[in-house]
Amino acid sequence: MSDRVEQLLRSALVPVEPPEALSDRLERGFLELTEVAAAELADWELSAMRDPRNWARPVAAVVVGSVAAGGLVLVRARQQQKKRHATGLAALEKSIRGVADDIQKHLKR
Amino acid sequence: MEATADKERLDRDFTELYRTHLRDVYSYAYYRVGNHHDAEDLTEQTFLQAYRHFERAQRESDGRPLRPWLIRIAHNLAANFYRDRSRRPVTQLEDASVLHEPHGTEQLVEEREEVKEVLEGVSKLPDDRREALIMRFALDMDNREIARALGRSEGATKVLIHRAIKQLEESLEEDGGDE
């Protein structure tokens, strides 16, 4: 019977192809990260940079921005072979907001 | 210059990881949460989190495959998903699109029914057993990979899978006996 169950499991639990729109969502997520980091830098006054205690914050923004920008490379590479699909899922906004909040918290430390 | 080269290499490596394992992460997410909408959300969050920690993971992996690490991220996020929403996964066969189009023969209808029963049986298993079966059959992971993803020893993983199949088998027999 176990062999039969394993056979049925193979039939039931087959890999599921992800929808094409998913890579769009990923790209937007990385874009949002980049924008948050860039805005953080733009708002920073140069005068504050005289105090070394303030250096960590913009450095963190640069790091986050470059990391997020790098992420675009991977999703765009995938998208070259895929059609674009319009998405507007609330879940994406929620997750982006979550990530953006994380970054803001980091930068405020 | 060296830092830029390192960054480019890191991005290339992550691109490769993403391309290779998007389907794995999505499949795992789908069978954990039971619908495409939440599976997309979970997959997206998994890769965002993976990207943030990729450099360290790559450094510490010592050349070992990173798929178990990715699935572990998805596993942890899925656990939070259920904690936040206080609900259990339900695998929806109709949404899975995993079956071939029915051809109207009795055999195919029977197989479809059996597959449905198996999916229902899997969804009723304890979390660790269900996850081990998803990793083994949907992702074709071996014991070593599953052990790393679940944070267990290989021996314990082998026992876990054996017991999961046994329990599923018993539940299918019971259901068959009830009919």
Image (cartoon, coloured by chain):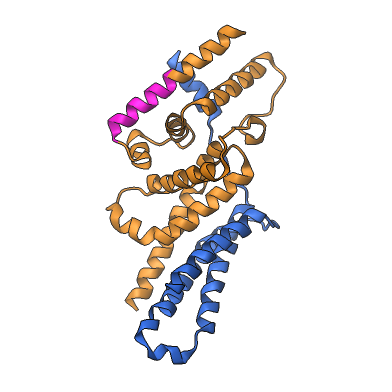
Chain colours: A blue, B orange
Residue A18 among magenta residues:
no
Q: B72 or B76: which is nearer to us?
A: B76
Asked if residue B95 is positioned above or below residue B61 in the image, the reply reads above
Prevailing secondary structure of the magenta residues? helix
- Where is residue A80? Give x, y as percent: 59, 61
Q: Tell me which residue sits at (69%, 16%) in the image.
A: B105
Residue B159 among magenta residues:
yes
Instruction: Say whether residue A96 is left or right of residue A105.
Output: right
- Where is residue B10? Give x, y as percent: 39, 64
Quadrant of the frame with the N terminus of chain A: top left
Quadrant of the frame with the C terminus of chain A: bottom left
Asked if residue A84 is positioned above or below residue A13 in the image, the reply reads below
Asked if residue B157 is positioned above or below residue B163 in the image, the reply reads below
- Where is residue B97? Give x, y as percent: 64, 35
Q: Tell me which residue sits at (70%, 22%) in the image.
A: B103
- Where is residue B71? Give x, y as percent: 43, 45
Number of marks present in the image shown: 0
Name which quarter of the figure residue B92 lies in.
Answer: top right
Q: Tell me which residue sits at (46%, 49%) in the image.
A: B20
Q: Tell me which residue sits at (59%, 19%) in the image.
A: B114
Q: B179 or A66: which is nearer to us?
A: B179
Q: A74 or A68: which is nearer to us?
A: A68
**Highlighted range, magenta:** B153-166
Instruction: Say whether residue A87 is left or right of residue B168.
Output: right
Instruction: Say whether residue B86 is left or right of residue B4.
Output: right
